Every structure is written in structure tokens, then in C-alpha cells.
Image (cartoon, grey):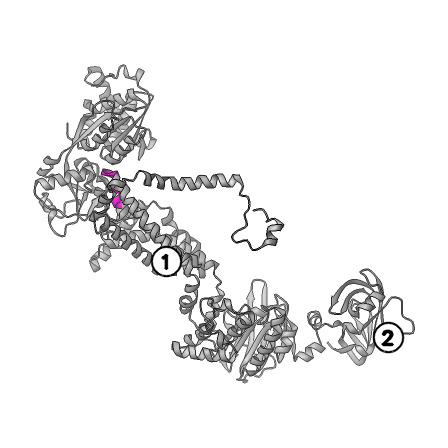
Amino acid sequence: MTPPAPDTRKGGRRPGPIRTGVPFALLLPALLGLAFLLLPLVALLVRAPWHSLPEQLTSPEVWQALRLSLVCATSATALSLVIGVPLAWLLARTDFPGRGLVRALVTLPLVLPPVVGGVALLLALGRNGVVGQWLDAWFGITLPFTTTGVVLAETFVAMPFLVISVEGTLRAADPRYEEAATTLGASRFTAFRRVTLPLIAPGIAAGAVLAWARALGEFGATITFAGNFPGRTQTMPLAVYLALQSDPEAAIALSLVLLAVSIAVLAGLRDRWMTAS
Amino acid sequence: MTTRTARPARLQVTGAGVAALLVLSACNSSDGTSSGAGSSASGPAKVSGTVTVFAAASLQESFTALGKKFEKAYPGTEVEFSFGGSDTLAASIVSGAPADVFAAASTKTMTIVTDAKDNASPPLTFARNQLEIATLPGNPDKVTSLKDLTRSGLKVVLCDRTVPCGAAAQKALDASGLRLTPVSYEQDVKSALTKVELKEADAAVVYRTDVRAAGDKVDGVDFPESADAVNDYPIAPLENARNAEAAKAFVALVRSAEGQRALTEAGFLKP
Amino acid sequence: MSTPDGIPPDSAEGLDSHVVVDRDAFRLDITLSAAPGEVVALLGPNGAGKTTALRALAGLVPLTGGHLRLDGDALERTPPESRPVGVVFQDYLLFPHLSALDNVAFGPRCHGASKAEARSQAAGWLERMGLAEHAGARPRSLSGGQAQRVALARALATHPRLLLLDEPLAALDARTRLEVRAQLRRHLAEFEAVAVLVTHDPLDAMVLADRLVVVEHGTVVQQGAPSDIARHPRTDYIAQLVGLNLYRGRADGHTVHLDTGPSLTTTEILSGPAFVAFPPSAVTLHRDRPTGSSARNLWRCEVAGLETHGDQIRADLTGELPLAADLTTVAAAELDLHPGAPVWATVKAAQTHAYPA
């Protein structure tokens, strides 16, 4: 950026950022990038079957799938918070052999095709899976084809986003606040709970929002691990995909609902959490 | 899901089979039973280049073999496949996907293409597929009929009603007045089968060809109601084909005696 | 475990420590003891290991060797949260999400007080610090001096038997510093247990502490009462801090033969290794070699640099004897001082001070 002209400095009271020339070499690709991201959404709106929309959206199946989507994505986010934040703390604040490797493994679900993730979950937690067979034998718990299975599949895919985000915030946060807390008699856990956690709350919120959004759109791991049954495991993305096979108009309508709900939720959260940071 | 048939690894495995088909092909061209416009004798002169075939997922094994045979019969050609759900394929053809031939798993999905007038000639049924119950190896749950699947405690997966195998299964169930609540409506027949292969489900209603392709990972159980829901597989060269000659030749090969033999081996019924 | 020099092992009261911390190429090895009610300042340049020593006493850095006893209790293996130690950190580290009151109540809460009880204790501490009306304020809305007092209240609220202060005044501007220093002195005087403060500012150390411990390169180079240290510096660092010219040599009667060559005449009679010190104000400068001067200490020098110190000019001289000289602006002008100018420097023997090394 170019430095501000001396006279603008002198004025000093101008609200907002100082206007500086944006290089064309940056502006053009930036606008292209924006257009590339927005165009498909615009197309969705342009081709939306507005006339049949009311009828499409009054079917109970839509609301069933939407409700399930919201419940599962929120549960998956909650689960990610409960086990992901401590994991992030472990990665950011402690030193143990192989920590770098563990961090790399944590991010693996980010690059793994979700369908492969779903198969991996089946092999681990399925009725016949490495751990799942014992769950079945000892507790009679089977996870595939259940709503719990949906939550687990979504957590598997979404939690890395939370862990990465929270770990980054923790690294940026001053660890000496924790030290100050321990000199006041706080155990490491109390220091974490009463000092670190409130300090990194904005980072946790951002990570949770990312994870929630990822969970809401989850398709591959969910359909592979939890299958597709209306009301139990058929979330919105699954409903959209299956509708696409027979009735593209219905699929577009469903997508619009999902889009509207996520925009509403993200905008609502932004006002309450994100701007506070 | 695009598969190039000219993959060396694949060639090694099926080399013997290709050689056998070649012999068959030679016999056919000499006795002139091969149908279609261009006979193999004049074929090499006119047919060349790449031909892109969009085919239903259930055709993967048999069409891959036929593709190799085609490339041998018409040197200089290459067959590219895109296997997937028939509806998805039909939708992409209508949206302008570059395909020369479309082979669907149901007449309903072919209608999407013919309604858009994207076919070059009327579709012809080249095979029929029948449903079968896939059970765990050895059939530990003693499933012998469609009715057995309604037993409580048995985890059954069906295809979703929006895909042909699901529609067919529903038709069979309705015809016999059975109510079946599966644990899942899978998005395609392969996913349904996979759930049984991984032993997550006890049984699935799939195509006979899929049971055949899964080998000893599942057992197949025939059921009489499947006769009520036999799927016709139509094939058609496409209007916007970039290689119309090769498209016609491929359709001809599929409908020829050797094509039919390959399909029957995979478990398809003759049209 | 070794017994530190000069401290009888049975002295149960107060702090008795020998802090050894190895970190990379750096080794900290200091013996530090203090009686209850005593305020000890660790004084030293940056990187001397003062803060490391403080962190070791607080338990935030493990000891490599040595020992740490507080009122007779061995604390080497005690985790920081279980040590009866309070810390005022350099930039206070007040929890930004808590009010001043809850910051102070944090310690009592951790020590088992109920929320109401902890808050009422905290309110008492803030009252004592004159901060009652700021109880609800968030740290970021407090002034530097107020934040410092909240930090002190927070550390004292756990009733520590050892209070550690890391550069307690460094974060303040010059004006607040004066005021806060006086308040801190009062609070420390009231504190009945051991207080150890770390500073690189000699004035802070001398005003606040009963005893100075000077640390350089990880070891104690000198310790004693502030007045004693100010008068008898034993290292260049301390001499600079207290503003004295310091030389080391070998005394023979009234003469000290400096290690660097020249000799100095003093009024004291000594023999053996000795230090000689004199303030810059004791130096008189001349343009020409003075004749008939009674000064026995006369050196030919050259001006290396000049800087203003209030209404005085401080001249840095090189030559036979490197030294610092203070003179008035008028005198500097009359002498036409400028870098590179040759001058003669004299110091009266009566203004020098020699003491055994």
C-alpha cells in the first residue's frame, strides 16, 4: 500500500480507512475470484423454481431433513468442542515426542475424501469394525444407520477445522496468563478453564462456526457411514443429492433452504461472537 | 468415474480373456452374424478415434471387457467410459456432456435423453437385469424369500427409490404386498452391496449382476417376485456425438452375439 | 544439598535459597536469602538471569540444582500453584476478561474461598490500595499505576510468604513512576513476609529495597545495603549505575597503581588490591596544562563524546585514563569542548575514595 499523502494525515479526523489505490494486477484477479465464488450461487437463484417453491417447501420431508441436519451439525459441533478443544490445547501447550506427527494426523480428515472417511469409520466403528464389534458384543451398540452415526461422521470431518483454528488461537495467546493463574494457586486445569478458555473464546467460536458449517454440508462420510433413511440419517445434503437424481427442481429448492438457513445462522453468530474479537 | 480401458495393469489381468474374445470376434466377422451398419471387415477403415460411452454403474465389468474387444476389433480406436448412476449420467448428457453413446439401467432414465432429443437413433434394449437378494456369505440369516427380509432384527438396505434398483425393488415389494423398512436407502446399487460386503447390513436387494460381480463376498438369493420388476437396459448413440461412426459401431458390438455373451456372463438376461 | 554461604541451616524464618538453573549455554547460580519483612532487589543488566531467578523461585522454571526453603519448608519440588508465593509480573498480566475485583478474587477462589467470600476479601484489598471505585473496571480501562496496584493486590490476596515483583515499575511512564514507586514502597514496608523484586533500574532498587543483590552473567557480583553499594561499587556495571568512575588497581599507601597503567592518589591508606572511585563532578577540565595546581591526579585526555544531563554536560574522555566528567554548560562553552578536543583532567585526592577489592 502507498503511504498516505501528508495533507490527509494532517486532516486526521477522516473516518474509515485511508483510501489508497488498489493495483490493477490485484484488483482484477480479486474480482474474478469473487465472481467465481458468487456466480454458481447466483445461477442457483436464477434457475430456482420460484413458482413451485412454496409447494416444494411445504413437504414434511424437507423439514424433517432440515431439522435432522441442524440437530446433527450442532451435536457434531458440541462433540468437537468437548474433545477438540482439549486436543488443540495438548498440541499447542505441551511438548511430547511425535507431536508434529500427531498434528499432521489430526489434519488428515481435511484431505481425506469424505467417502473414504466414511469407509474408514465403518471399518473402525461398524458392526464388524475394529472397535465396533466390541461395542456391539459388550454393549449392543451399533452405530451405522443411526443418527449417532451421522453425528460421528460429521464430527470426524468437521473437528479438524475446530482443532486447527483453536490451536492457532492458543499459539497466539500469551501463555504467561496461565502462569500468572498458577502462581495464584490455580491448577493447570483451573487455569485453562478460568483463564485460557475465556481468552481464546473468539478463536473457539470461529472454529466452532467453521466446524458447524462443514458438518452441515457433510455428505460423503455421512451417506457412507450412516446410510440414508428419512428422519433418521437423511440430512439435507443427502436429500439434495437424491432429489437431484429424479427431480432437479426439488434439489434446487432444498439447496436454497440449506443456503438460507446457513446464511441466517452465520450472520446471527457473526453479530454476537465474531465482531467481539 | 472415467475409466480408460487401455490400462496396462488391467490388460495383464484380463489378457487371456481379451485373446479369447479376439478369436470370437474373428469368427463372427467371417460368418457375418454381427449386426449393425458397418461390418468389421470395412470397420477399420471408417471407425477410428476416441469413443466416449456413458454407462450405468452396473455395466462396469461387462462394458469394460467389451471396450477392450472394441479396441482390438478397430485398431486405432480408444473407448473411454464414464460409469455412474443412470440419472446423473442422463442429466449430464442433457446439460451437454461430451458423450457418444448412452447405456442406461432403465427406460425411465433413457426417456430423459430422448425427451431432450439428444439421441441419434431410437434406443434399443440390449439387456435386462433382474433383482436378487444379496446376503452375508453362507446366508447365516437363512434368507430364502423376499418376505424373510421383513423379519425384525434383520438389517436390510435398499436402493433409494429415485434410482432404478430402488424403484424396481419397491415395485417387487408392492406387487407382493410386503412392507419393508430398511435401515438405509442407499444412493446407488454399489453402495447397497458394499454395506453387505462390509457386513454392516445383513441383506440388500440388488441386481443379479452385482451379486455375480461381488464373487464370494456375498451370497445371492433368487426370489420369484423379481420377475415383476425386471429392468430393461436401453442403449442409444447420441445426437451430438463427436464420433458418430464409432458410436454406431459400439452399439452394434453390444447388441452382437459376442456382446450378449459377455453380458450374460455378467448375469444379465437377454432382452 | 549444599548450605549456602553465611546462612546457618537452622534459620527457619524467611527465604533460604540456592538457585541453579541451566538453560542452553546459560547458567544461573545464585544464593539468595532474606529475613521476613526484608525487601531484596535483584539488580542487573538485561540477560543477567534476574527474571529466570524469579521464575525459578515461583516454580515456573524447574531448578537444575540447589535448594529452596521458605520458612523452613523445602519447596524445590512443589508445583507453582502450591507454593506460598505471589508474583507481580512485569506487564502485570491482569486477566483481561475479569474485572479488577475478580482479578484480585481469583487467588482466594483458587484457595477454596466461596465466591462471595473471595469477592469481599478482594474488595478489602482494593480498598487498601485506594482502588475501591475501580472494582468493576476491566484491566484495559485502568491506568498503568492502577493496574500495577491491582496486580499487587492480586498477588497479596493469597497471603504469600514470598512476594516476587518483576520490574514492577518498568511499564510506567516517568511521571506515574515516581508516584507509584512511593506507594509501592509503602505497601512493601507494610508487607511482613519476604519480598524479592527484580529491576534494572538502580533508583527503583535503592528506593524500594533494604538490600541489593547485583547479578551479572548469572552470578551474584555484589550485595549489601543500597548506600554501601552506591559508595563502593565493585563492577563497571554498578559503577555506571551509581554514576561513578571506577578503577581497579593495587594500593600502596596513598597511591593506587591502576591495572591499566596510571596511578591515582587518594586520602585513604591501603595496601593490596583496591578499587578507587570518584564522581564525574569531582573532575575538573582544563584547556591547557594547569600550572601550580595542587591536584596530584592530572591526566592528558581527549573528548570522545558529550551529552546533556539536565543543566550539566557529561563529557566522556579517553586518553591516559578513560573517565566521565561533569561540568556546567558555561564551562563547557568556555573550554570550547567538542569531540576530539584535547583536555587536561584533574581530580583532587580528597574527592576520590579507595577501598579494598
Taking the spot 31% from the left edge, 16% from the top edge, the residue there is B46
Q: Which residues are magenta?
A: A238-248
B72, above or below A72, in the image: above
Question: Residue A33: image x %, image y %?
Answer: 44, 41
Question: Residue B179: image x %, image y %?
Answer: 11, 46
Chain letter of the residue carrying label 1: A
- Determine which quarter of the picture holds residue C106: bottom left
Q: Where's the C terminus of chain A, which quadrant?
A: bottom left
Question: Residue A57: image x %, image y %?
Answer: 24, 46
B38, above or below A115, in the image: above
Label 1: few (<14), some or many (≥20) within 10 Å?
Answer: many
Q: Is residue B95 left or right of residue A194?
A: left
- Determine which quarter of the picture holds residue A166: bottom left
> What amino acid does circle 2 point to?
Ala
Of residues C198 and C180, the one drawn nearer to the viewer in this rendering:
C180
Q: Is residue B192 left or right of residue A2?
A: left
Q: Which mark is residue C268?
A: none
- Residue A246 belongs to the span the image colors magenta: yes
B206, above or below A158, in the image: above
Label 2, label 1: how many angstroms apart (C-alpha)?
79 Å
- Residue C231 belongs to the span the image colors magenta: no
* Magenta-drawn stretch, dominant element (helix, strand or loop): helix
Chain letter of the residue carrying label 2: C
C182, above or below C303, in the image: below
Taking the spot 78% from the left edge, 69% from the top edge, the residue there is C325
Q: What element does badge 2 sit on? A: loop
Q: Is residue C75 visible?
A: no
Of residues B9 and A208, the one drawn nearer to the viewer in this rendering:
A208
Question: Residue B83: image x %, image y %?
Answer: 27, 34
Which residue position is annotated with label 1?
A84
Q: Which mark is residue C295?
A: 2
Q: What element does badge 1 sit on? A: helix
